[in-house]
Amino acid sequence: MNVIVLDVHHPEDGRVNRHIKYVQSLGYNVIHINVNRYFPLISSVFFSKFGEKGFQIPIGDFSTSIKNRIILQFLFFTPFLSIKIAHHCKKSGFISGLKTIIHIHDYELLLIGEYLKFFLPGQNLMVYDRHEYLEIIKGEHLFFDHLPRFYEKISSNWINGLVDISENHLQITKKIFPNSISTVIPNYPDEIQIEKVEICDKIKRVENNDISVIYFGSLNDNLDRDIPLTLEVMEKILILNNHSKAFIGGLTSNPDLIIRMKNLEKKYPNRFNYLGFIPIDDVFKYTAQSTIGLFLLKPQYCVSGSSNKLFEYLRYGVIPVIRADIENPELLSECSLYFSKYEEGKDVIFSISQLIMDKERMKKMMANSYELGKEFSFDKIKNRYQQLYLDLFSKQ
């Protein structure tokens, strides 16, 4: 079987990489095309992380200007980009005698996937892996806010298989794609990537005020993450504990945000650390040593779902501090600080302040987090990808 994976995510994205790694391990002929619309430092190049054939195609000028966004929509809507992708697939070892799954991780590429079904020979079926909260995109331009749903609506009858991140969220997406065979694959971490955590030693360090707080991920404050509140919480911890450290990583072109983080580095030398982009293996190393992990969304972006960050925190015995709608929040009651979208930033800061001053509570929460995290492993659910593929072809 050919499996063509299309996405616009950063090459270090955990979900996309877990998917590729797993289907490659099954012996499928995997071709990964990363359409790069966001990251100017990544060049057009062949690559292979897990034995797959990969290629990155840069498009546009990577800006958020109206002109560039219109150019991108032209490329996504017309067949020109899909012709180029089909060429790369054939050049990368597409086997025409095999059945093909076109697995799409981003709404922008839905029409591209449909064009590929015609440009590539053989029996080709399309799977849409919907792991973004597209119901609540709210930017500066109403036209662009409606594009995700527009792409989904016009392609709804062409999508054979649907993957969602949670049972609750699947009930929403099934209304958009009623004819698709569906499955749920939460954002559980890959067990192989999890380093052994000496949780007892880690808990003991809290006694010596060795506390650290982390956030690694999107720093685009125009989207769902509440980056200003994240920085406020980090600074509050640095103020309350003179031995504490804060680590934040991710890409941003926002000059105000960059200036703010540089000022925090000057104000708290060797304690506040902006690391920029770091590879996923380094993210895990920092997470393994951390006490508190932040996942704070803006209130208008809270939608029930499955977060990479949350499950990584639990697996490493990190105390999650969450403002988001998550499934079954009661499961986290003994190991996290959880806030609904109706609670303000000052409530988050007040609660984190109380926690920092209570070492015994922190130690118990870390132990509970580590034990709960053992239940969430990608190994337990990864076979759902293969089962979906087999079900799709058996129904044809």
Image: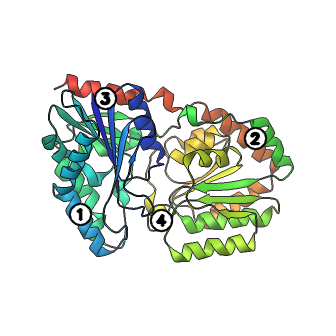
At label 1, which amino acid type do we have? Gln
- Is disc 1 surrounded by few (<14), some (14 to 19) or many (20+) residues within 10 Å? few
Question: Do labels 4 and 3 touch, CB within 8 Å?
Answer: no
Q: What residue does disc 4 label?
A: 220
Q: Earlier in the sequence, mark 2 or mark 1?
A: 1
What's the residue type where badge 2 is placed? Lys
Q: Which residue is mark 1?
A: 73
- Label 4 sits on what residue type? Asn
Residue 257 is left or right of residue 393, and the answer is right
| C-beta proximity under 8 Å, tags 1 and 4 | no
Residue topped by disc 2: 364
Q: Quadrant of residue 130?
A: top left
Say which of 277 and 224 sits in front.
Answer: 277
Task: Name the mark nearer the viewer: 3 or 1.
Answer: 1
Quadrant where the C terminus sits is top left
Given residues 280 and 55, the one toward you in this image is 55
* Residue 86 vs residue 241, the one in the foreground: 86
The single residue placed furthest to the top in the displayed view is 394
Q: CA distance from mark 2 to mark 3?
A: 40 Å
- Single out the mark in the foreground, 2 or 3: 3
Question: Relative to 168, is 57 above or below?
Answer: below
Distance Cα–Cα, label 1 vs label 4: 21 Å
